[in-house]
Image (tube, helix red, strand yellow):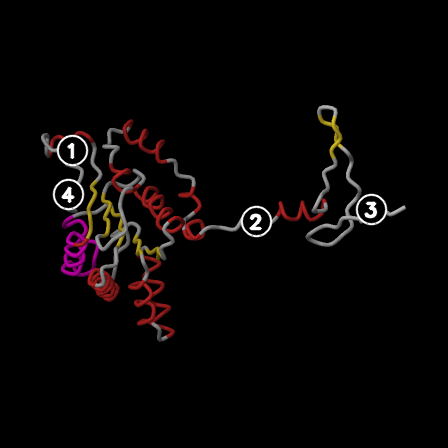
């Protein structure tokens, strides 16, 4: 009599027990396992590999529900069309500035846009705010790598600056930011920005107002600007326009 060959786990090679037959609709079936119970549990316990967007995006923003956000905006009296304007942005030399009051979901929606850019279109992105920029500059200066630091920011497919103007920038940091904006716009590389400031309010967030003015002019010139307003503000400003939520910051 010839004995049947024992099957082994495809992961660890451990001999697997003989399978129990299963009777379905009067027919006998034998399903041979390919992995042992220990390897199965081990595989389930291993963390899921994160996507590029998941590695970069703060965990809080990963749970954003855009439909729910739009409903909340309507309930609070805001124009709820702007999230689709942001999500519809297509990669190209023209960047995107999203301006509006704090607490309305600007960063959340921008991260949803970045999810498409990173995970579907496989763009390389850099995420900055004032603190990350200042810390990066200081570390690069200490290591003698300022030029490489700036070059990395210039050559990234997408540069996203969250909450521009929220933290006061010194003269040196402002000059470097202006240089970065000019280098990217000249190279046709887009910049994505969220901010709660516009006009002179933006300029005042810089140690030298003329530096803020120069940065603001560059962004207005080379970016699509979406301004979030309440419905009352929108119709009071331009009651005949259908796209009055779009104008320069």
Q: Is residue 60 left or right of residue 163?
A: right
Of badges 2 and 1, the one in the foreground is 2
| Residue 147 lies in the magenta stretch | no
Disc ID at residue 247: 4
The residue at 24%/45% (across/down) is 98
Q: Quadrant of residue 167?
A: bottom left
Which residue is disc 1 drawn over?
234
Q: Is label 1 in contact with label 3 (beta carbons under 8 Å)? A: no
> Where's residue 74, x and y in %?
27, 28
Residue at image location 14% in from the left, 49% down from the top: 199
Q: Residue furthest top?
A: 25
- In front: mark 3 or mark 2? 3
Query: Residue 67 lies in what quarter of the image?
Result: top left
Mark earlier in primary sequence (4, 1): 1
Quick one: 145 or 191, which is closer to the camera?
A: 191
Marks 3 and 4, Cα distance to the nearest angstrom?
Answer: 77 Å
Number of the front mark, 3 or 4: 3
Dot 1 or dot 3, earlier in sequence: 3
Disc 1: CA contacts within 10 A as few (<14), some (14-19) or many (>=20): many
Q: Residue 103 in the image: state x and y as whole percent.
A: 31, 39
Please tell me the numbered disc located at residue 47. 2
Location of residue 175 in the rendering, given as x and y in whole percent from the top left corner: 21, 65
Q: Is residue 229 above or below residue 75?
A: below
Q: CA distance from mark 3 to mark 2?
A: 37 Å
Stretch in magenta: 199-221
Disc with the residue nearer the chain's start (2 vs 1): 2
């Amino acid at each position: 009599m010839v004995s049947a060959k024992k099957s082994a786990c495809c992961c660890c090679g451990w001999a697997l027990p003989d399978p129990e037959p299963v009777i379905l609709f009067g027919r006998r079936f034998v399903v041979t396992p390919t992995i042992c119970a220990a390897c199965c549990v081990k595989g389930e316990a291993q963390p899921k590999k994160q996507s590029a967007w998941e590695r970069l995006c703060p965990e809080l923003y990963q749970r954003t529900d855009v439909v729910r956000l739009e409903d909340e905006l309507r309930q609070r009296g805001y124009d709820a069309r702007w999230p689709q304007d942001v999500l519809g942005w297509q990669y190209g030399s023209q960047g995107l500035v999203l301006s509006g009051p704090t607490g309305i979901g600007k960063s959340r929606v921008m991260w949803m846009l970045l999810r498409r850019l990173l995970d579907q279109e496989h763009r390389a992105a850099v995420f900055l705010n004032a603190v990350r920029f200042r810390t990066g500059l200081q570390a690069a200066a200490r290591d003698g790598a300022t030029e490489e630091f700036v070059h990395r920011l210039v050559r990234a497919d997408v540069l996203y600056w969250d909450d521009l103007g929220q933290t006061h920038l010194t003269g040196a940091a402002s000059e470097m930011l202006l240089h970065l904006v000019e280098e990217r716009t000249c190279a046709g590389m887009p910049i994505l920005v969220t901010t709660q400031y516009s006009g002179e309010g933006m300029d005042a967030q810089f140690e030298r107002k003329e530096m803020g003015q120069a940065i603001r002019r560059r962004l207005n010139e080379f970016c699509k600007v979406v301004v979030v307003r309440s419905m009352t503000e929108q119709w009071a400003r331009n009651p005949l326009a259908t796209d009055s939520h779009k104008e320069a910051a």
